[in-house]
Image: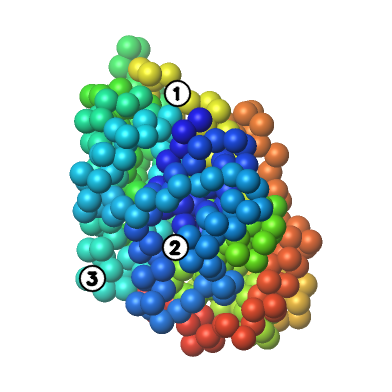
Amino acid sequence: MNIFVLGGDGFCGWPTSLHLSELGNDVTIVDNLCRRRIDRELGIDSLTPISDIHERIDCWREVSGQEIQFLNIDLSSDYAAFLQALKSNHPDVIVHFGEQRSAPYSMKNSLTNRFTIQNNLVGTNNICSAIVESGIDAHLIHLGTMGVYGYGTAGLEIPEGYLNLELGGSDDMEILYPANPGSIYHMSKCQDQLFFLFYNKNYQLRITDLHQGIVWGTQTNLTRLNEKLINRFDYDGDYGTVLNRFLTQAAIGHPLTVHGTGGQTRAFIHITDTVQCIEIAMRNPPEKHARVKIYNQMTETHRVRGLAKLVAGMTGAEISFLQNPRKEADENDLEVSNECFLTEGLEPTRLAEGLLSEVIEISQRYAERIDIEKIPCASFW
């Protein structure tokens, strides 16, 4: 298959690009490399030293014999270039990772707020519009977030995207599960859902929307093949996801920073499962006139303080409870349906000491690259 991976230089996009290429697909990464620019803006680097995108691609060619193409296109501002790329390449599948992915970064100030909206919403609309204008019949697979559901206690198992309303008789209906964004980033993902609903209804775009949990881990079997293929690893307060941040803190003897009571329950998924889920979604596209297909892309749920205790028990690290920078419930329960992926072949990677130890080893190997001042979250809302 001919596949475009938008945002293919990023944390989820790079290992996905390698996996899809290894399967024998023709892969093109479309990325404006803005995540690297944000590193420079924040004065932070990936814990792992990530190679230049061209070095990465050259190394993959040498290791695998497979070619990955690269197009430097800003999806939010260079519509004409993206449209021409679609017309020239006719991709069968478009995997959309090309969004600013950090809630704290989106809430830092008005500049990051507006950048997130411009990048995410204009970019997503441009993608859908270009598919329509190009006339191609591509399956669009979008990486969304569990955060569209909000982080309160729902009182029911959260379904996969849609909620059935029993109004009685022929008036029963199905709607998108009510959105409840907690940040500008999450709001952009909620709006993505409406874009997809619109383009699916009016232009029959075939779309799969993946509501993903928090990703942990960093390496896959392919990114381990060579140092130049290593995946990025964020540990800072803006981009470091909670479990990766705990493991990095433990590796350098820094207290594990738990915000609030730590009673927040979150959904989690390992990076290797993220890659597998993209493949499963690709193998199971919706029919031409079917509604948007929504998966809950997660494998397990945990309370934050429970994760901190797990890591502390493994490493002897202390736990430090800090003021919560977010406006959210101190405690919440979370029950989530993920039947689609389980029935279609996903074998979940569970939290296990072996995998946690692997992340700690990476943190220890590159400990000299850690800037302790960047660990605390500096965005409050």
SS category of the residue bearing label 2: loop
Structural crowding at the residue carrying mark 2, measured as other residues with C-alpha within 10 Å and reported as few (<14), some (14–19) or many (≥20): few
Whether label 2 touches label 1, CB < 8 Å: no
Residue lying at 48% horizontally and 82% vertically, measured from the top left: 374
- Distance from disc 2 to disc 1, alpha carbons, whole Å, reads 36 Å
Q: Which mark is residue 329?
A: 2
* Residue at the image position 36 percent from the left and 70 percent from the top: 37
- The secondary structure type at the circle numbered 3 is helix
Task: Establish if 55 lies above or below 247.
Answer: above
Query: From the viewer's perspective, is residue 56 above or below residue 258?
Result: above
Residue flagged by tag 1: what amino acid is it? Pro
Q: Amino acid at mark 2?
A: Ala
Residue 110 seen in render: yes
Q: Which residue is mark 1?
A: 286
Q: Measure the alpha-carbon separation of dots 3 and 1.
A: 37 Å
Q: Tell me, for residue 111, which label it has, or none.
A: 3
